[in-house]
Structures are given as structure tokens and as C-alpha cells.
Image (cartoon, coloured by chain):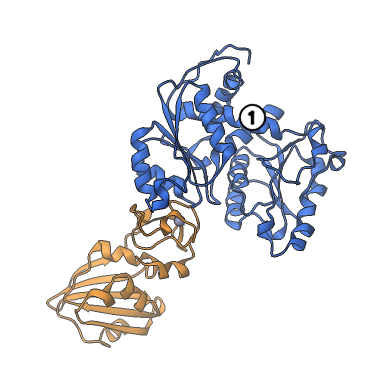
Chain colours: A orange, B blue
Amino acid sequence: MSQEHNMRRVTAIRNGTVIDHIPAGHGMRVLEMLGINKRSSVPVSMVMNVPSKKMGTKDIIKVEDRELTQDELNRLALVAPDAHVAIIRAYSVAEKLTIELGDEIVNVVRCTFSNCITTNPREPLAHRLKIVARVPLELRCHYCGRPQDLDELVNNVI
Amino acid sequence: MPGLITMDDLSNEEILSILDDAQRLLPVAEGRTYLPLLQGKILGNLFFEPSTRTRMSFETAMKRLGGDVVNLGDVKTSSVVKGETLFDTIQMVDGYTDIIAMRHPRQGAAQYAQDAARVPILNGGDGAGHHPTQTMLDLFTIQQAHGRLDGLKVILAGDLRYGRTVHSLSHALTRFGCELILASPSLLKMPPEIVADLNAHGAKVTETEDLLGSIETADVVYMTRIQKERFADEDEYAKVAGAYKLHASNLDGAKEDMIIMHPLPRVDEIHPSVDQTRHARYFEQAFNGVVARMALLCRLLDVEVPADIGGGA
Ligand SMILES: [Zn+2]
């Protein structure tokens, strides 16, 4: 019931993507990681701090006229690992997606260690962070091996 | 086997078998026998920061086995200073050589180079990261002295924070079931993530600031240099570093077969009076750099070291 109520805080969209179960306060990060604030001109609405049975409070984002791909969604592993995504077509849910966490996060964020070889922006190889534990999420740089501070890491979005 | 970036690239069995090869290669390293196992092979020495010792020992190892060496030359005058990426440098050297030995000031550079190269990379030190060829020669030295690697009690002393030598070595020793005593000033303690890894190996690890108080029970005391630059001022350095110096008079209670090691160069953390004691092993250790690297070069180039070399090992 509260789910219904939450969804109605913003108008239903005809076509596009709804991202639900974002930890409260991480909505802006999600937009950043999807590159939505920078390059897109599609309408976006976000509700913040809405009550959630599972999470206490959460953020929800609706992006109109754009369907997120699984690859784009996987970028969110760092900030919203439990996000649920619904692809909306003609006002109804056409597809449901969840984040797939592989063994590595590739070319999403840069290693946070200041003396890592990857801090040279001209080095062409992929930025790779290995997942060493899932809950809670623990990452190490594939190259320098340093453990990554997740709060710092979200500032290093590529 | 692609290359040697960290000690994790070698299993315990591989480590022991490479040390075995090194033992048999001793007469070749000493110049008593000529064995051109690596004839026709070229080693690329890529030292992006100065290191006479490691670079020379790679070069000597290659030449003792009949191989050739090309050097990057002075970083200040090479293309690196013109802003060439490591990726591009590797693309070039990869085409010229059969194997690359590399030191780089940035951590992770060796893994990066390995991902960019077809030939094996031997990591000769990357920032404060790993230095596995040093670890192999250290293990060789310990095995030479004690006849085994397992179950020894080893003190690592001095700068454990920035010393990449002790980072790689501590990992390897705990894999062989050694007990570690980490003796350092609080400012230069072993990074917590490394201590966590060592504990995860199930190793007994003790951290202390008291080096001299731990010596009596040790089988190996591994000293490292504490650099002045790590401290805010000279007084602070003098006060702290004094506790991490060895004099022959500190060794009275030591076990008979305890050995003292040091990656060299030393400054004053080991007094010359120690050189004359039966415990001093750091000069043999330095020599072992050649033979350990010979064995590694053969292994990574897939060249078998014959069982019987002759020359009286
Ligand atoms: Zn890194």
C-alpha cells in the first residue's frame, strides 16, 4: 500500500525508467553515475526520503523517454546495490531489472589511491576494481591492490 | 606463467621449486661454471626510478646465463620525460625483448604493464607496493641458513609502513607458517590492510615497538632503513630511530643460528661491529639477488634448469 502511495508522489510516466529502492540521500549520486544531469534533456523527477518498509526511507527516480540498459544499471552497484528498475512502456511495466554484480567494476570509477598508476589520465587501460566481498561491499584496485573507501570512491566517477 | 607481479602469482610449491633451481645455479652465479641457458634471449630493464642494486643484479643474472640486456637508460633523457604513457613504453619494449624487469614509482605499475604486454613482467618494485624478486632472494637466504622456511620466528624491524620489501616478505613468510614480530615505531607501522591479510592466513603476528626485547627468541631479524624524511624534524628522528639500531652487544642473548638480514643499502641501523658476528647475513643476501633472479628468469622464460649442473654446488 505504501508502495502505491510512494509511486504516486510523482506522476506516472508513459515511457521510460523507474529506479526504486535507492538508499535515501543517494538519488543525486545515482543521477550523477548515470550521467543524467550532464548530457540528457529528458524530463527527470526524483523523490527523496520517502518511507519504505524494507529500507526505512529511500529515494526514487523516474527518467522519461529513456530506457536504461543493464550495463548502465550495473554502474549503480556502488551507491544503490539493491535498486530495482522498471522499464515503462505505455504506462505499464514492460521489464524489470536488478543490478548484476560481477567480479569487477570496470570503467565506472577511478581508484582512490593518489599514487596509483591509473591516476595518470592519459593511461589508456580500463579502470578495474575487484570485488573482494559483497555484503558489505569491499573493493580493491586491480592494479595497486589498495582497498577502496566507498565514500571517497563515489567522488571518482568516470 | 605470465609474469611475477606479487608473491600471490606463485604457489608455495612453485616457490620451493624455484629456490631449488637457484641452489643448483649457485656455481653459475659464482662464475665457476658457464651455462648459457638463456642464450638468444633479451631482458628489457625498465627502471623508471634509480636502483643500482636491483638493476645490476638483473643484468648480471641475465648475462651469467648467456642472455642479453637492453636498458631504458636515464629516465630524465628518455621518452618517458616527454610524457609518454607507460602503456606506450611497454608496447615498444615488448616488441624488442623476451622478458621485462621493471621498477616504477607508481603503485600498480607492474600489473598495469603486465596487462599491456605479451612478454612476462618481473616486478622490481612498484611504489610502496610489491617487490617479489627481493622476496625470493630473502627466502633463499633464509632457507640457506635454516634449511627450511616453515615454522620460523621472524622479526621484521624498522620502517614497515613504506618498506615494500617487508610487505611482500611478510605475506610469503606467513604462507609458510612463520610467526612474525613486527617491530616498528608507531608512525611506521605495517599498514592495517596487510596485517589483516596476514591474520587471514592464520599467522601469529605480534606488533611491538620493542625490537631489542624480542631478539632472544628470533630465528631471523630482518632490518630495514628508517628514513629521516619520514619525520617532522631531526630530533624526532634521532629519538625514534635509535631504538631500531643493532650493535654486536645487543646480540649476546640471541640464538646461535639466528641470522640478521637487510635489503641494503644500510645507513647506521646495523653497526659495523655486527658484520663480524656469525649472525650477519646481509652480504650473502645481496649476492643471492643474482642467483634468485637467475632462477626466476629461467622459470618465466620456460627454460628448464638441468638437474645436474656440475661445478660443485
Ligand atoms: Zn589503484
Classed neighbour count for the residue bearing mark 1: other residues with Cα under 10 Å, few (<14), some (14–19), many (≥20): some
- Residue A124 position, x and y percent, is 33, 53
Above-or-below relation of B21 to A90: above
Between B32 and A140, which is closer to the camera in this rendering?
Answer: B32
Between B104 and B201, which is closer to the camera in this rendering?
Answer: B104
Image quarter of the N terminus of chain B: top left
Which residue corresponds to mark 1? B287
Above-or-below relation of A44 to B229: below
Above-or-below relation of B108 to B231: above
- Residue B286 position, x and y percent, is 65, 33
Q: Chain of mark 1?
A: B
Residue B83's quadrant in the figure? bottom left
Q: Residue at x 37, y 56 (%)?
A: A127
Between B42 and A72, which is closer to the camera in this rendering?
Answer: B42
Q: Residue furthest front?
A: B77
- Residue B182 position, x and y percent, is 70, 50
Q: Is residue B147 visible?
A: no
Could you tell me which secondary element the residue under label 1 belongs to? helix
Between A135 and B4, which is closer to the camera in this rendering?
Answer: B4
| Residue type of the residue flagged with mark 1 | Phe
Q: Residue furthest left?
A: A90
Image quarter of the C terminus of chain B: top right
Q: Quadrant of ligand 1?
A: bottom left
- Residue A47 position, x and y percent, is 32, 84
Q: Residue at x 26, y 61 (%)?
A: A71
Residue A81's quadrant in the figure? bottom left
Q: Is residue A108 visible?
A: yes
Q: Is residue A8 left or right of residue B221?
A: left
